[in-house]
C-alpha cells in the first residue's frame, strides 16, 4: 500500500509494485484499481507502477468529489515521488490524466490516455444525468447504470440492460454505481474543456479500440488535433476494456511508448494490429 496526504488532509491510497521508471495509473469508472492488476503486473517487469485508488471510488470516503480534488490527489503522489512520471488514465481516469497533464506540466515525462470521455458537442451526462441521479437516490443502482451505459456511453440497449441487471445483483457494484454517476457529475461540472488541453506540452499517446463506440474514437481524434505532441493507436479487436481482455498488449504499448519518449525518439502516429 502506497499512501500520502492530499491538500485537504484526505489520505490518498494506491497500490505499488515493481521497480524502475514510474508509471502512475488512474483507473476508469467502477474500478478501485483491481481491474488493472494484470496490466500493472506486466508493466512491473520494467517499471515501478502505482495504481491509484481514485477518491471518487473510495467507499470508505463520503460520496462525491470534484476533479480538482482528484487532481490534488495526483499532485500529492507526484510530489512525494520527487520525480517525473508517465501518467496513464483510462476513461474518466483518462480525462483526469488530461487535466493533470495540463495543470502540472512539470510532473510528467509523458501521458498515455485510453478513450477519455472529453466532451465535444454535449456534456458526458448532459440531459441524462438527472434521471441517473434520481435512480441512485431511489435505491435503483441497476437502473442508474442502465441509463449511464445506454444514454451516456451509447452501448446498445440490450447490453445496457444486462449491465444494469449485473450491477443490481452484485453488492459491491451496487455501491460503486452511485460513485460512477457522481463521477459523471464531476466531469459535467468542468464544462467543455477540450481547448484547455492545448497547454499540454508533454508527449501523449492516445489509445482507442476499434470495437468501442464511435464517439470515443471521435474524442481521441479531437484531442489529437489539440495536443501539441501526440500519436494515436488503435487496438485491433478491442473495445473499452482492453485492460481485462488484452492486458499484455496494453502494457506493451505503454512500455514501448515510455521507452521511446525517454530515449528521445520522435513520435509516430500508427495503428496497432
Image: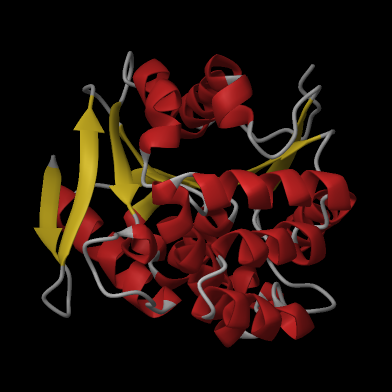
For this rendering, which residue is in front, 144 or 84?
Answer: 144
Could you tell me which quadrant the N terminus lies in?
top left
Compared to 213, does 251 lie above or below? above
Residue in the picture at 16% in, 80% down: 8
Q: Describe residue 26's horizontal placement relative to residue 135 as left or right.
A: left
For this rendering, which residue is in front, 80 or 161?
Answer: 161
Q: Describe residue 32's horizontal placement relative to residue 148 as left or right.
A: left
For this rendering, which residue is in front, 263 or 134?
Answer: 134
Q: Describe residue 9's horizontal placement relative to residue 220 as left or right.
A: left
Q: Percent position (x, y) of residue 256? A: 54, 22
Q: Percent position (x, y) of residue 36? A: 43, 33
Q: Please say which color scheme the image uses.
A: secondary structure
Residue 88 in sight from this viewpoint: yes
Residue in the picture at 54% in, 79% down: 138
Residue in the picture at 30% in, 59% down: 58
Compared to 204, does 190 lie above or below? below
Residue 156 in sight from this viewpoint: no
Which image quadrant for residue 55? bottom left
Q: Percent position (x, y) of residue 41? A: 35, 19
Could you tell me which quadrant the C terminus lies in?
top right
Q: Describe residue 203's horizontal placement relative to residue 268 as left or right.
A: left
Q: Percent position (x, y) of residue 88? A: 47, 44
Compared to 34, does 99 lie above or below? below
Which image quadrant for residue 209? top right
| Circle count | 0
Amino acid at each position: 500500500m502506497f499512501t500520502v496526504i492530499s491538500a485537504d488532509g484526505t489520505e490518498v491510497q494506491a497500490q505499488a509494485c515493481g521497480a524502475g521508471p514510474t508509471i502512475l495509473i488512474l483507473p476508469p469508472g467502477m474500478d478501485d484499481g483491481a481491474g488493472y492488476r494484470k496490466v500493472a503486473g506486466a508493466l512491473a517487469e520494467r517499471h515501478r507502477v502505482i495504481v491509484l485508488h481514485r477518491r471518487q471510488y473510495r467507499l470508505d470516503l463520503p460520496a462525491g468529489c470534484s476533479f480538482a480534488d482528484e487532481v490534488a490527489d495526483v499532485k500529492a503522489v507526484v510530489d512525494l515521488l520527487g520525480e517525473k512520471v508517465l501518467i496513464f488514465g483510462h476513461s474518466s481516469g483518462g480525462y483526469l490524466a488530461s487535466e493533470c497533464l495540463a495543470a502540472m506540466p512539470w510532473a510528467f515525462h509523458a501521458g498515455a490516455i485510453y478513450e477519455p470521455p472529453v466532451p465535444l458537442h454535449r456534456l458526458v451526462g448532459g440531459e441524462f444525468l438527472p434521471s441517473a441521479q434520481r435512480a441512485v437516490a431511489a435505491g435503483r443502482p441497476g437502473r442508474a447504470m442502465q441509463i449511464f451505459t445506454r444514454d451516456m456511453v451509447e452501448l446498445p440497449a440490450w447490453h445496457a440492460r444486462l449491465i444494469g441487471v449485473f450491477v443490481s445483483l452484485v453488492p459491491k457494484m451496487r455501491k460503486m454505481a452511485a460513485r460512477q454517476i457522481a463521477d459523471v457529475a464531476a466531469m459535467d461540472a468542468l464544462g467543455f474543456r477540450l481547448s484547455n488541453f492545448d497547454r499540454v506540452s508533454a508527449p501523449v499517446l492516445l489509445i482507442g479500440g476499434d470495437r468501442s463506440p464511435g464517439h470515443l474514437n471521435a474524442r481521441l481524434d479531437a484531442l489529437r488535433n489539440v495536443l501539441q505532441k501526440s500519436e494515436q493507436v488503435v487496438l485491433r479487436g478491442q473495445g473499452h476494456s482492453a485492460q481485462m481482455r488484452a492486458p499484455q498488449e496494453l502494457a506493451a504499448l505503454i512500455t514501448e511508448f515510455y521507452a521511446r519518449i525517454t530515449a528521445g525518439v520522435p513520435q509516430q502516429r500508427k495503428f496497432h494490429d
